[in-house]
Image (cartoon, rainbow, N blue to C red):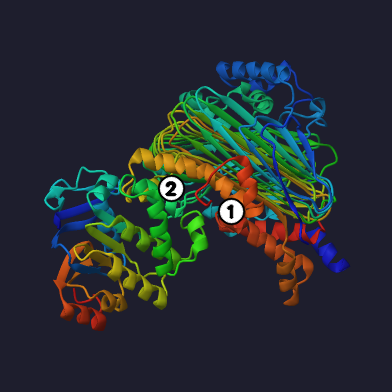
Amino acid sequence: MNKHTLFRDISRDTKNSYALKRNERIVFFMQDRSGELVFHMDAPGAEAYVFAILSGSGTSVSSLRITSIHSAPDTFSRAIIRGIADDVSAITYNGLIRIEPGAVRSDASQEIRSLILSPEASVSSQPALEILEEDVHCNHSATLSPLNDAERFFIETRGVSENQAKQLLIKGFINDIFFQISDIASPDAIKTLGHVTSAN
Amino acid sequence: MNDTHDNLIDDYRYGFSMPETSVHKTGTGLDASVVNEISAIKHEPDWMCQFRLNAYDIFQSKPLPKWGADLSAIDFDSITYYLKATEGQAKSWNDLPKEIKETYDRIGVPEAERGFLAGVSAQYESEVVYESINRELDRQGVIFCDMDTALKKYPEKVREYFGTLIPPHDNKFAALNSAVWSGGSFVYIPKGVHVHLPLQAYFRINAEAFGQFERTLIIADEGSFVHYTEGCTAPIYRSSSLHSAVVEIFAKKGARVRYTTVQNWSKNIYNLVTKRARADEDAIVEWVDCNIGSGITMKYPAVYLAGRGARGEVLSIAYAGREQHQDTGAKMVHLAPDTSSRVISKSISKDGGQTSYRGLIHIAKGAENARASVVCDALLIGQASRSDTYPSMDSKNASASIGHEATVEKIGTEKLLYLMSRGLSQSDAEGLLVNGFIEPVAKEIPFEYAIELNRLINLEMEGSVG
Amino acid sequence: MLTLNNLSVSIGNKQILHGISFHFETGKTYAIMGPNGSGKSTLASAVMGHPDFSIHPESSINMENDPLIGSAPHERAKKGLALSFQAPLALPGITLFDLMRVALEGKADPVDLHQKIDAYARELDINEELLKRSLNEGFSGGERKKFETLQIALLDPKVAIFDEIDTGVDVDALRTITAFLATHLSEKTTKIFITHSAKLLKAITPDEILVIKNGHLVATGGDELAHSIETSGFDRF
């Protein structure tokens, strides 16, 4: 089935709960939004992509919780979260994928990657799964790490200084989200975000 | 079909009961006088009695945990907290009371194996009734005895470590164990000594409305190695049985300790265990944990990586069938630089069973270059089964890395069809796939257990037990 | 151009290279060969300044009499040393252009750079879609090697080391790569190819071949050496 893909930048939304309609496909994006959000897959064929970027700097404390609840068959959700904690900031991420009985053939996933850039920053991640239906596929992954040394060396061998290499990697970490969004939603959607990637 | 069915019921040899030959038994219910009584029966030093009483107060003051499995049906007043099967201990298999020998015959400790064992602490009604340390262990200076004996023979060593890793106030059930503990093993491995045969402990619960509270303490001195294994069975009863054990492990510099458990309690048992290890510099602690039985299990083996280069592992298998809830997981606390940890958890929920994984990875500020990885996979089989995953990870160190991955799914239809097209029945095919699923952990379990595990899984898959 | 003097390299407690001495001349082409695990890649990484490798105090690496030891990798690159990796890493969120723009800051105008990259990509038969993607992410082995080749050409180095440029690359792609290098690398560039394959030797026609075995430089020579390796492998060293 060819689903039309809608794109929603919910960075400044006040709404906390989003319910998708039957066979609807929506790509949600938020940058530096804290709080607790719930995405309801309660209509068959609903598909939600949720992209979130959390950046911590100075003494900021950010906390985001994303819950995806599947209660209808053939539903799909994929949450991709990137967090960067610098300076003395703290980032907390909580996630829940809950699949109710009857939500057969559901496919739900969450991927959280966090970068810790400074010795005083801290990150914590608690992605949870509650699966009450057998015929589903569900997974999540979470990583917390500093910048990758091997990647940094690779870049430096091209004549890029250590600092520049780090900046490049940090930008890339975030940019990766925009690349993924443009693969799923239309490239025009990215333009509405006002983010310029070199792809344009 | 009926034939097979009966054979399988027969095969569940563990579901039988021996008449009680208990010599000493406290009444049901718990209060300070029961605690005093237990300590008096054992002729314990005063400090231990005080320790117990203090722990009892803590137990009383703590509420049941608000998270985890449902413990509301435990009736603390109807449990007997102490039972001693014989006076003193036997020195060889021949000295064991007849009923107990029969029990072990039926569980299957063959004649040939008995001499082979490195040293056995057999737990019967919460008191160690048999222990034999063979000449090899004596020669190496290894101490392996029951906890009561250790308290008498090695009081300074016990006092130095007992309750220091898991203090009574740690949680309500650690407090309970600290108040009424009885039996369990004390193991001390001297510097540089490698114990090649696994040290084993068999024990069982065999009284109605009875609790088991064994306390195990393992100290592996620098550069030593030991593999401790426990596998246990219990008969089926109508009223609940409470098993609340505490295991503390100290792995000193360069030591390695592996602790393997295959648990197959019957479904009326509450299995609430606190297990924690401390690994010093370059030490390794591995928890291999299989939870197949009991109605409710709460168990989260932990390793505190306290010294540079220390390593911790938890490899676990959890199986939850009808009316079972396995709430298990792992806890890794990285306190020092260059520490590493790995958790592999494989769970299976079938026919309405529920498995929950609860994990914690904590990287403290000083844990430079710490590395942690967690993989939890869950299989769901049948209607109304449930799988939960509740991982938690946090880092206060900018050079550390944590990776966590979890997958939940059903048995692949294509794989099933493939195997069935080769002539396997559906349950045989499921059994094969499930055994393949748990293989990364199962291969770490000693051979005899692995076979038992395979058979148990296959029995469970056939759905004829429980 | 590039002189290795008594180069001994360890990783942790393990010594990989033992006292290798050799002088690579300006503009010449070299092949470094040897069995798997002999230390060829370690040599390339150590020369480039990989932090995991420790250089023994008696060793020296000089480029045009300028000591490299003590310089960071990017300083060595700025001096004119370039390395094409055996297993180029994926860089999520970073395109080829993103990387090259920073690498050639001050040396190339971004617009010119864009055009040059497009032209080189066409010449190397690279699917232009890949230019817009994260570098190396999901790329085949051959595509990654082509991207390495393209970058080396852009960097215009004095010494270019190619670590197994032929591995994972099909016959046509290899031909495209070697032709491209012949066209775009300066005559003055010292070219060092680490390889197993006799086929590549035929394509690059090295001035001299070095054989490294168990971390030792065991033989150097010309065509006769190449022929001997082709017929009887590395056993006789």
**Left or right for B65, reference B196:** right
Count of marks placed on residues:
2
Query: Quick one: quadrant of the N terminus of chain B?
Result: bottom right
Residue type marked 2: Glu
Check residue B136 in the rendering and tell me which mark sits there, or answer none: 2
Does dot 1 land on a helix, a strand or a loop? helix
**Left or right for C70, reference B203:** left
Q: Residue furthest right?
A: B2
**Callouts 2 and 1 in the same chain:** yes
**Residue A96 x/y as whole percent:** 71, 39
Residue type marked 1: Val
**Left or right for C80, reference B313:** left
**Residue B339 x/y as whole percent:** 44, 38
Mark 2 Cα within 10 Å, few/some/many (few <14, many 20+)?
Answer: few
> At 41% from the left edge and 77% from the top edge, which residue is drawn?
C172
Chain assignment, label 1 = B
Q: Is residue B232 visible?
A: yes
**Residue B337 x/y as whole percent:** 40, 34
> Quick one: B93 or C191, which is closer to the camera?
C191
Does dot 2 land on a helix, a strand or a loop? helix
Mark 1 Cα within 10 Å, few/some/many (few <14, many 20+)?
Answer: some
Check residue B441 in the rendering and tell me which mark sits there, or answer none: 1
The correct choice, above or below, for C60 with respect to C160 in the image is above
